[in-house]
């Protein structure tokens, strides 16, 4: 018998994501919240803490790997669409058909063939097929997970791949003519894949671990305590995780390993050996800036974002918690007096004097010159927030009016 029950679906038959339509089916499990996060690209948003961490990773790779004439050899891909095929995310990485990570309960599926990438590793075999040997992929990734201080269904990863020829691997070994990358009829062991020579794997492993320790030291400083933990990934062998000691706890920051040779063979790079890693930007940023909760990265609260407004991503910043009480924004516009040396800082000082600790932030949001009178107008946004209690609108209005009065008297401005 035909079922007459209507199909319950949160979305219409087609769903539009990043400007493109996709059919839905009974695999579709996107939620409106996830859909609305697509395209936010926090990792490339100016001044965002995740963008500073991205920049520091990129700078480290640009500096550490240069060719003979001093140019960086790693290419950076931070703008690849997170909407990928099941083939990209799983099959191309030899993830078994019945692996738990493919479950509907773990991923956000657009339909049975398409999902939001669960890791930036999803792009590696395609980029290798394009002929790239050294590259970084940085972007947003999506996993169905609990929401707590360290887990969020959207986070950001940076993946790296480095492929080397036999000459490159053995270039620093004397009399290395008889050394080879590959071994015929070898056996897989805990140390290596069957097809690899032990000497090639050990040199690659050493470079990989040296690069990653250098990276965490470049980010956290020379004193950082770390440890390697053996791990399993379907797409690398051997594989490791790197943990750093932070706030009396070991925190896992990345997974890495020697790439499965089958992946290189299928992507047209069978004459090379490769290493790869994937790390979480939020994990690094939380340790680096002392950010206690992963949800804060999604904050649009200017009290959070303002703290990261620096041009140099190496600037040391320690996050200061924003009060949990709500903000209250009031704007103030005035004509500034002509023929005086009024500066915005004069006004900032006055506001701080009168508003005291209820003022969290002041920003000059607009200025213009009147076409006829040539008078200059400034508009300031004042953000009020008390650290210990909720301010009433009436209280805020009183302070705001007092600021207007005193500015009129002391700075000769004319409120508009
Ligand atoms: C991976 O995603 C592998 N693709 C990494 C990899 C790439 C290994 C290339 C080998 C070669 P994993 O699921 O462990 O592995 O995630 C990698 C990193 O992402 C973790 O170490 C962690 O820093 C971060 N991460 C994982 N899950 C979350 C989460 N729910 N919230 C925030 N960060 C997370
Ligand atoms: Mg892991």
Image (cartoon, rainbow, N blue to C red):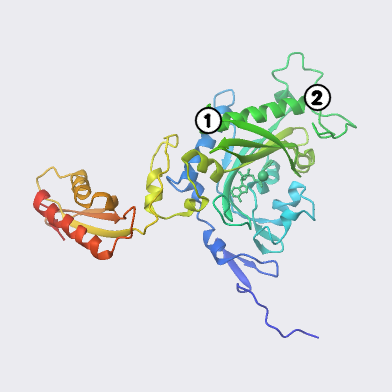
Number of labelled discs? 2
Q: Which residue is mark 2?
A: 180
Q: Counting other residues with Cα less than 10 Å from the Cα at mark 1, is it few (<14), some (14-19), or many (20 or more)?
A: some
Of the image marks 2 and 1, the number of the one nearer the N terminus: 2
The image quarter containing residue 238 is top right
80 lies left or right of 367: right
Estimate the spatial distance between the alpha carbons at disc 2 and disc 1, rounded to whole Å. 33 Å
Q: Quadrant of the N terminus?
A: bottom right
Q: Secondary structure at mark 2?
A: loop
Q: Counting other residues with Cα less than 10 Å from the Cα at mark 2, is it few (<14), some (14-19), or many (20 or more)?
A: some
Q: Front-most of 291 and 279?
A: 291
Q: Front-most of 399 and 184?
A: 399
Q: Secondary structure at mark 1?
A: helix
Residue 408 at x, y percent in the picture? 11, 54
Identify the residue at horizontal 66%, vertical 30% (top origin).
208
Q: Which residue is mark 1?
A: 218
Residue 285 at x, y percent in the picture? 51, 42
Residue 240 in view: yes
Residue 19 in view: no
Toward the top, the furthest residue is: 175
Identify the residue at horizontal 50%, vertical 36% (top origin).
56
Residue 255 at x, y percent in the picture? 66, 40
Vertical order, 125 against 394 (above or below): above
415 lies left or right of 228: left
Identify the residue at horizontal 70%, vertical 70% (top origin).
26
């Amino acid at each position: 018998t035909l079922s007459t029950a209507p199909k319950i679906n949160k979305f219409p038959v087609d769903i539009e994501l990043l400007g493109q339509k996709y059919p839905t089916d009974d695999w579709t499990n996107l939620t409106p919240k996830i859909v609305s996060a697509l395209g936010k690209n926090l990792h490339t948003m100016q001044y965002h803490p995740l963008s500073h961490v991205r920049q520091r990773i990129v700078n480290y790779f640009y500096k550490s790997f240069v060719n003979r004439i001093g140019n960086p050899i790693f290419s950076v891909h931070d703008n690849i669409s997170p909407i990928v095929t099941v083939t990209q995310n799983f099959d191309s990485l030899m993830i078994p058909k019945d692996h738990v990570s493919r479950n509907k309960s773990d991923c956000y599926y657009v339909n049975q063939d398409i999902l939001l990438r669960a890791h930036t590793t999803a792009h590696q075999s395609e980029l290798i097929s394009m002929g790239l040997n050294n590259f970084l992929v940085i972007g947003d990734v999506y996993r169905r997970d609990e929401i707590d201080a360290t887990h969020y269904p959207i986070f950001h990863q940076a993946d790296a791949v480095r492929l080397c020829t036999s000459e490159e691997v053995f270039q620093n070994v004397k009399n290395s003519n008889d050394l080879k990358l590959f071994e015929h009829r070898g056996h897989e062991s805990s140390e290596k894949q069957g097809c690899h020579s032990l000497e090639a794997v050990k040199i690659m492993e050493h470079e990989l671990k040296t690069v990653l320790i250098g990276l965490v030291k470049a980010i956290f400083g020379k004193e950082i305590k770390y440890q390697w933990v053996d791990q399993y990934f379907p797409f690398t062998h051997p594989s490791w995780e790197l943990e750093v000691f932070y706030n009396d706890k070991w925190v896992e920051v990345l997974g890495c390993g020697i790439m499965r040779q089958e992946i290189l063979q299928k992507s047209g790079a069978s004459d090379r050996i490769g290493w790869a890693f994937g790390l979480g930007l939020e994990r690094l940023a939380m340790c680096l800036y002392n950010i206690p909760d992963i949800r804060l990265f999604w904050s649009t609260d200017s009290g959070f974002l303002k703290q990261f407004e620096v041009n140099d991503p190496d600037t040391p910043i320690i996050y200061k918690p924003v009060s949990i009480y709500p903000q209250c924004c009031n704007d103030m516009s005035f004509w500034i007096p002509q023929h005086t040396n009024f500066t915005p800082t004069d006004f900032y000082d006055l506001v701080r004097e009168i508003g005291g600790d209820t003022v969290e932030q002041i920003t000059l949001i607009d200025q213009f010159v009147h076409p006829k009178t040539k008078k200059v107008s400034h508009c300031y946004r004042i953000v009020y927030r008390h650290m210990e209690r909720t301010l009433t609108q009436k209280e805020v209005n009183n302070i705001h009016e007092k600021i207007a009065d005193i500015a009129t008297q002391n700075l000769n401005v004319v409120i508009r």
